[in-house]
Image: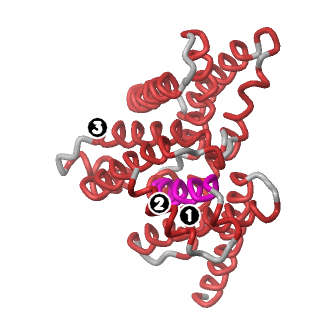
Amino acid sequence: MEIINYWYRLLDMLPFSWAHYYFMKNALLAILLVAPCFALLGTVVVNNRMAFFTDVLGHSALAGVAIGVILGLSDPTLPMIILAISLAIAIIILKNTTKSSIDTLLGVFMAFVVALGIVVLSRQGGFSRYTGYIIGDILTVGPAQIFAFFGIALAIFAYWYLLSSALLLTVVNPSLARSRGIKTFLIESSFAVLLAILVMVSIRLVGILIMNSLLVLPAAASRNIAKDICSYTFLSVAISVFSGVTGLIASYYWGASSGATIVLIACGCYCISLLFAKKHLQQGE
């Protein structure tokens, strides 16, 4: 708690009106913790063409909330996480054991979790109570959630430091990774679990509808202009943090949705990266 109080005092020194509201201070700190996590995992999502996979995980939040309602829980975060982890591991297993197209499998899982969530939550006209999960509201973040984000960030940074090389080799060339003694199933599964936890814990920040955009856009923009894997990772983190901070502050002055504004900034970064990528191609010719 002392760390958060220090953060509050630090922002009080800034000559901006938004810096004096606690909900903005909490939201900014949450972005600084979560944005790098999205960027790191997003590089793997983009390289491995997992955008649809993360979209399925995000939409599984509806089914997780529905299970929480059935169990009578006031906070459905735990069933959301458990369902997302189970779903992620099931997809990885089926991906490695069945001949069916992965897109087909993902489509089936998407249809099931969305339909289950809507059926349960819409009973007796109560679906409107859960629209916060669809749209999200980063301005409602409190100190307890910030500590949760801090723990998740530490876990993801530690995982990236220890296993990023094995993970990237597994993504690029699974056969080569197995020949070098890397347990590719465990690597894929552990990554999917971390991704599922991050998505479920962050779903209230930006909502189901645009969660996938925060994972994909910074990494995709970085990929257009990066020269190597190090610059790819660094630029992805930089773009993610820039989009998050700029979008949050812009939404304050515009009176708009913070999550959607952040995504619009990220879209702008991606469009700019396309211009730089095209320029490099022209120079190469």
Which mark, residue 186?
A: 3
Task: Tell me the residue at 41%/29% (across/down).
Answer: 89
Q: Earlier in the sequence, mark 3 or mark 1?
A: 3
Res. 105 image quadrant: top right
Q: Name the front one of labels 3 and 1.
A: 1
- Give the CA separation, mark 3 to mark 1: 28 Å
Say above or below: 98 vs 206: above
* Most frequent secondary structure within the magenta stretch: helix
Instruction: Kindly identify which residue carries mark 2.
Output: 36
Tell me the element at label 2: helix
The residue singled out by tag 1 in the image is 240
Residue type pointed to by label 1 = Ser
Of marks 3 and 2, which one's residue comes earlier in the chain? 2
Residue range in magenta is: 22-39
Residue 164 rendering spot, x and y as whole percentages: 31, 56
- Indicate the amino acid at tag 3: Leu
Q: Are marks 3 and 2 in contact (CB under 8 Å)?
A: no
Foreground mark, 3 or 2, reads 2
Mark 1 is surrounded, within 10 Å at the Cα level, by few (under 14), some (14 to 19) or many (20 or more) other residues, namely many
